[in-house]
Image (cartoon, grey):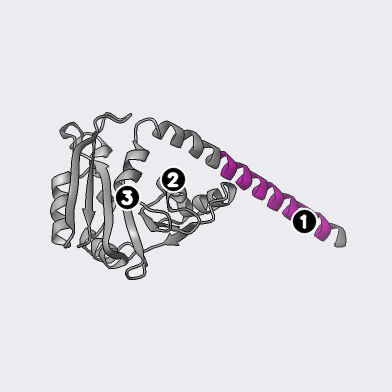
Amino acid sequence: MDYRVKLLAFFICALAVFFLLNTGYSALNTLSRLDVVEAERDQWQRPAAVIQALGIRPGDVALDLGCGSGYFALKLSSPVGKAGRVLAEDIRRLPLTFLWFRTILKNERNVTVVRGGATDPHLSRRQVNEVLIANTYHELADSQAILAQVRQSLVSDGRLVVLDRSPNPADIGATRLAEHEISAGQVEGELRQAQFEIVARQDDFIEKDPDNESWWLIVARKP
């Protein structure tokens, strides 16, 4: 009987070790793939121009709302500097977990991971200098609720940059890309409704991405 118990315990431990090794391998593979995908994204996403639009100064607090695995959040770390902070917010646990590991691997100590809710990013009032909403606005379940929270979190004269895909008539009813598109005009109207002042708008910010989609960029400020 004692032998059988020991044998069962051995198999359980072996399975646990196998599971942990397999999970670790999958995680490392995903992290490596993220670096490759983001290097390709650098070729067309124009990240330097997006960051320039934010007008970040050393010591600022910048928010990447809907950060995913951290493509922009990690790029904001250097502009804010050691005295500044990057808030990387998303509602999904898995991408935030990968971002947390990436901040450790890249030694980005000024990046703070924040898990928000569908209508509440869990932000403090008048804490943030700049907010970036990149490839996320079209996903917002209640844009006005989120914009109200963003506005409260911004300091006076704080800046908001929104970047997203333009609607493509060819996608309507034909591809799932149509679910991830929104017009600059609609977003500009919603920003004005949320009492933001429009600073600039570029309807052809990115003329063509790998999916043959065009992107627009809007810069707004809190008066």
Height in image: 103 above or below 165?
below
Residue range highlighted in magenta: 4-29
Q: Which quarter of the figure has residue 190?
A: bottom left
Residue type marked 2: Lys
Left or right of 184, for residue 139:
right
Residue visible at 20% across and 39% down in the picture: 166
Does the magenta segment cover residue 16? yes
Cα distance between the residues tagged 1 and 3: 61 Å
Residue visible at 51% across and 50% down in the picture: 98
Residue 116 at least partly seen: yes
| Element marked by disc 3 | loop
Residue under label 3, please give it: 55
Cα distance between the residues tagged 3 and 2: 14 Å
Identify the disc placed on residue 75: 2
Height in image: 126 above or below 88?
below
Quadrant location, the N terminus: bottom right
Q: State which tag comes first along the sequence, 1 or 2.
A: 1
Residue 91 at least partly seen: no
Instruction: Count how many numbered circles sit on residues in the image.
Output: 3
Query: Which residue of the protein is positioned furthest toward the front in this rendering?
Result: 58
Height in image: 189 above or below 167?
below
Quadrant location, the C terminus: bottom left
| Element marked by disc 2 | helix
User: Foreground mark, 1 or 2?
Assistant: 2
Q: Position of residue 221 (x, y in %)?
A: 22, 57
Magenta-drawn stretch, dominant element (helix, strand or loop): helix
Cα distance between the residues tagged 1 and 2: 49 Å
Does the magenta segment cover residue 88? no
Q: Residues within 10 Å of mark 3 (few under 14, many from 20)?
A: some
